[in-house]
């Protein structure tokens, strides 16, 4: 989602850096893929081409000499973002500014020059190295392509220096990748990335394919090289403990979008976005006496083919804002929203429940199916947990965490509609009665403190449910602001 920065309606910068300090800046960077886009499918009217929204409007900047961590669950778009910002993948839309120039408009020759400025360290070192190349060729060939070194002998000398810098030696020059351990291969990959003397390194989970025993060594190496050479590093990982140790700032990514970005210490001390809070709650604490409440997330990451409306995190969010006409506790609201999400995505299966009930008893009426579905998807019970009364219906005493009477009636009516085969009508009935702003409106980017940006309705002072005094600055969506026209 593309956005403008505003303070009381006037444009402001997304961060507190000057243009001279910013090495790389992403503005609304988007990468979509077409699924099933074949010429045969194009000729078939019953086939549709689906769009995978892998990266969806990312705004991010990196200053010269800083390490920015990019974290998020698997499949959230981190690696696709890395490849797109380096122009290894053509962006669908948006801009990538390197030293103030938009590389998305570069010619082939300009991109070639950019390749010497920005390099990538891949997740799997064995897959990223040509198995037919010796280390000598792996390191000297990029130098020759980018006219680095006065002669072949000079490039070999540089290659030896690089090997020594990453903890290897001249004796490794004529070996092939299969002759190295995983950690050694990653050292070679790092040396190759440094061979063209870059300013920007994108490290895509550089230790995830390595044994635990060598992960710390590679992390220390990257950190030392970054400090020694004043490199700018985008460090992609799912290991939050690593991020806390080496990164200056952290960006949290969810379903192709940035949910929160802040300096490392403030983010870990006081995470603001509910998704970030859930991630932080999963970090192991080395103190056996310490107690931390684990924040569970409902369900899996939604598909980027059909992301949720409004805030993409709202179906799983433990702090989703209830509508103004909701009169009960937040726990009941979360239970209701969980049920509605399952109803909409087809998780609730009346036919399967009927079959399971019939395996327990001779027959299952519609009312019995509705009761069992209610107990399973609202109370958390499965059909095998249910006992039966003499009339063949589940025992009411087995149900847990029931909704308020008015809401329970609404849910049971929706289940009856579902059992009747009208799923869309069942979902619509619930939407018409209770709908959160989180499900209908995209959240704004809100700078709560200097450099701490959160994309969450809870910090929007214009909406109910925002923490008191949360927002000092609002970075509004293009569709939500008219500051350019004022």
Image (cartoon, grey):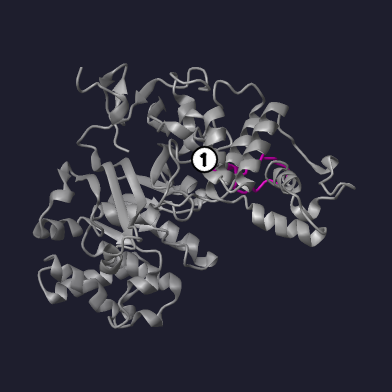
Magenta stretch containing residue 287, yes or no? Answer: yes
Magenta stretch containing residue 364, yes or no? Answer: no
**Residue at x 9% of width, y 60% of height:** 109
- Check the image and report above or below for 338 versus 485: below
Q: Residue 86's quadrant in the figure?
A: bottom left
**Residue at x 81% of width, y 50% of height:** 386
Q: Residue 170's quadrant in the figure?
A: bottom left
Span shown in magenta: 279-296
Res 345 visible: yes
**Residue at x 22% of width, y 69% of height:** 158
- Check the image and report above or below for 375 versus 445: below
* Residue 279, image x, y percentages: 54, 44
* Residue 199, image x, y percentages: 24, 52
Q: State the residue in front, 419 or 294.
A: 419
* Residue 34, image x, y percentages: 31, 58
Q: Magenta stretch: dominant SS? A: loop
Query: In the image, is 9 to the left or to the right of 257?
Result: left
Q: Residue 56's quadrant in the figure?
A: top left
Secondary element under disc 1, as helix, strand or loop, is helix
* Residue 146, image x, y percentages: 14, 65
Res 294 visible: no
Quadrant showing the C terminus = top left
Quadrant showing the N terminus = top left
Q: State the residue in front, 101 or 300.
A: 300
Q: How many marks?
A: 1
**Residue at x 65% of width, y 52% of height:** 350
Residue at image mark 1: 275
């Amino acid at each position: 989602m593309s956005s403008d920065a505003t303070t009381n309606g006037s444009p402001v910068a997304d961060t507190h850096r000057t243009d001279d300090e910013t090495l790389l800046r992403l503005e609304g960077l988007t990468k979509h893929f077409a699924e099933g886009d074949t010429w045969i499918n194009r000729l078939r009217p019953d086939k549709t081409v689906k769009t995978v929204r892998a990266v969806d409007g990312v705004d991010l900047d990196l200053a010269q000499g800083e390490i920015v961590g990019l974290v998020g669950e698997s499949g959230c778009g981190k690696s696709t973002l890395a490849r797109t910002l380096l122009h290894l993948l053509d962006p669908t839309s948006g801009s990538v500014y390197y030293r103030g120039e938009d590389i998305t408009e570069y010619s082939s020759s300009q991109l070639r020059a950019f390749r010497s400025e920005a390099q990538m360290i891949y997740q799997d070192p064995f897959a990223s190295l040509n198995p037919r190349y010796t280390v000598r060729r792996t390191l000297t060939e990029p130098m020759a392509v980018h006219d680095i070194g006065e002669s072949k002998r000079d490039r070999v000398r540089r290659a030896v220096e690089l090997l020594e810098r990453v903890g290897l030696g001249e004796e490794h020059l004529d070996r092939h990748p299969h002759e190295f351990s995983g950690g050694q291969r990653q050292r070679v990959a790092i040396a190759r990335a440094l061979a063209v003397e870059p300013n920007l390194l994108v490290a895509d989970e550089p230790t995830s394919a390595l044994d635990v025993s060598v992960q710390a060594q590679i992390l220390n190496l990257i950190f030392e090289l970054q400090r020694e050479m004043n490199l700018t590093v985008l460090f992609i990982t799912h290991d939050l403990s690593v991020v806390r140790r080496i990164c200056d700032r952290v960006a949290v990514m969810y379903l192709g979008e940035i949910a929160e970005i802040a300096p490392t210490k403030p983010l870990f001390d006081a995470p603001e976005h509910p998704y970030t809070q859930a991630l932080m709650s999963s970090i192991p604490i080395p103190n056996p006496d310490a107690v931390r409440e684990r924040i569970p997330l409902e369900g899996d990451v939604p598909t980027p083919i059909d992301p949720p409306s409004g805030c993409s995190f709202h179906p799983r969010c433990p702090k989703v804002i209830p509508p103004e006409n909701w009169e009960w506790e937040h726990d009941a609201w979360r239970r209701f929203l969980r049920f509605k999400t399952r109803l909409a995505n087809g998780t609730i299966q009346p036919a399967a429940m009927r079959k399971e009930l019939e395996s327990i008893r001779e027959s299952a009426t519609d009312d019995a199916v509705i009761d069992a579905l209610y107990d399973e998807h609202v109370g958390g019970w499965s059909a095998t947990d249910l006992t039966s009364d003499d009339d063949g219906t589940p025992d009411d005493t087995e149900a847990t965490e029931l909704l308020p009477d008015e809401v329970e009636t609404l849910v049971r009516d929706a289940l009856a509609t579902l059992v009747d085969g009208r799923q869309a009508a069942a979902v619509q009935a619930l939407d018409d009665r209770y709908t959160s702003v989180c499900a209908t409106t995209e959240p704004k980017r809100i700078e709560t403190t200097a450099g701490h940006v959160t994309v969450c309705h809870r910090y929007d002072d214009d909406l109910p449910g925002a923490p008191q005094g949360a927002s000092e600055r609002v970075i509004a969506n293009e569709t939500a602001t008219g500051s350019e026209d004022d």
